[in-house]
Image (spheres, rainbow, N blue to C red):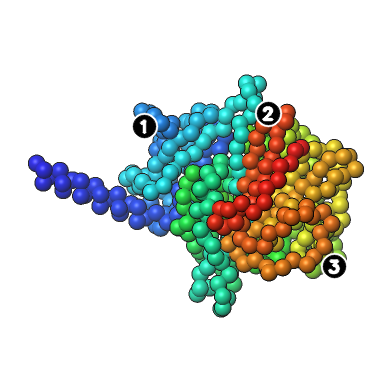
Amino acid sequence: MKVIQFVLLLLAANSIFAQANLLQSGPMVGYSTMREVLLWVQTKESAEVSFDYWIKGTNRAKVFHTASVMTSKAGAFTAKLIADEVQQGHRYEYELRINNIPVPRPYPTEFQSQELWQWRHDPPDFTVAVGSCAYVNEPEYDRPGRPYGSHYEIFTSIHEKRPDVMLWLGDNVYTREGDFSETGFYHRYTHTRSLPEMQPLLASTHQYAIWDDHDFGPNDLDGSSVLKELALRTFKLFWGNQTYGINGHPSVISNFKFNDIEFFGLDNRYYRSANTRKTGKRQMFGEEQLQWLISRLAESQAPFKIIMAGGQVLNTAPVYENYIHLFPEERKRLLELIEKENIKGVVFLSGDRHFTELSAYKNKAGNMVYDLTASSLTAGTPNKITEQNDHLVEGTVYLKNNFAMLTFKGPRKKRVMNITIYDSDGKQVWTKDITP
């Protein structure tokens, strides 16, 4: 009898190992609401995937199940499944199943549903990790010489802070010269997403993203790209935002709330004018996106309105792809609309520049406007910065790999946002509190 039991256990273990071998990357936790949460996974070949989940601490007293999905080559073997039996205000543990066999992970696999705090008590305190510019080396496709990517332990450092949410501000992958085809885009996203150091972070922190040029295609690419529909399709396959686009027009534009804070994800590529073109309309976001943004900002009751913009908005140095350098008229219009509508608590988040800094100014309506640039996670960084940014907050420039943590805390009518910058080892660089 013991021999039979041993054989059965051995067969079960082999089956679990075989299914785990089919896992390419993930699982990843996407958007969260009070009633549903998105879960994502990628396999190495076509396979049936699903998730079981249960309230944390109940020892699986009641287990819920997502639907099952068959991954396919046409979708880069990715799958998005909805945990649609969640109740508000709970933490859940979950387990991936491949071909109906559980695939346990050696780190926490958890998600949370948002809490129904309105009309009941003050909003919960929570933390948001922020980063951009994640270059993962692949020598056969990289430029010769010193590797451009480094410090992959930064993802372990972020995970150790246990943020509730992570915002990716663009250049989340770096396409190379060989990547400009469906096969190439799928390969680049898969290669980056499969980084071992990234997996624990993806598995228990809710991930939201926008893009910049390197997710979209070659460096500094604009809306004239003939591959932009492919780029958008790939982005949507690999990220778990709740929405994409506005008014029926394709883009990575998104809008969501987490507790009492509202987030606005902008698209600075799909409808962008060519940087070097001298005639025609000049735009980075476009009038429709600006009008949508201002309407949503004016309507928002959130104490902080967090705008994920990709590139720098407030920096006054006319260099590289800074907003003021390439699209000064549109920038002026955006900031004037924020001022005229008397919108308070505006904080832009940007990446792109491979260094970190905080910019701030008070507009004529008497409201502070901020722009936190958080860059880069793993891509190369400059040795020095000599540009003149008239809105720079003294002491906030940092030239090494880093990430930001935003902590929202305090009573509903006295919310404070703490910004803390950490180096790749998770050591504090600087910290600052701001109020609406």
Category of crowding for the residue at label 1, using alpha-carbon neighbours closer than 10 angstroms: few (below 14), some (14–19), many (at least 20): some
Of circles 2 and 1, the one toward us is 2
Name the N-terminal-most of marks 2 and 1.
1
Q: Nearer the viewer, mark 3 or mark 1?
A: 1
Quadrant containing the N terminus is top left
Residue placed under numbered mark 1 in the picture: 60
- The earlier-in-sequence mark between 3 and 1 is 1
| Amino acid under disc 3 | Lys
Q: Quadrant of residue 347?
A: top right
Mark yes or no: residue 113 visible. yes
Q: Can you tell which mark lies on residue 411?
A: 2
Kindly state the secondary structure of the residue where label 2 is placed: loop
Camera sees residue 337: no
Give amino acid for label 2. Pro
Q: Nearer the viewer, mark 2 or mark 3?
A: 2
Mark 3–mark 1 Cα distance, whole angstroms, equals: 63 Å
Give the x, y percent position of residue 295: 78, 38
- Marks counted in the figure total 3
Q: Are marks 2 and 3 in contact (CB under 8 Å)?
A: no
Mark 3 lies on residue = 278
- Amino acid type of disc 1? Arg
As drawn, the label of residue 362 is: none
Indicate left or right for 353 with 179 as reference: right
Q: Residue at x 51, y 58 (%)?
A: 153
The answer to whether 185 appears left or right of 100 in the picture is: right
User: SS for tag 1?
Assistant: loop
- Near-viewer residue (301 or 250): 301
Q: Nearer the viewer, residue 215 or 133?
A: 133
Q: Residue at x 39, y 42 (%)?
A: 95
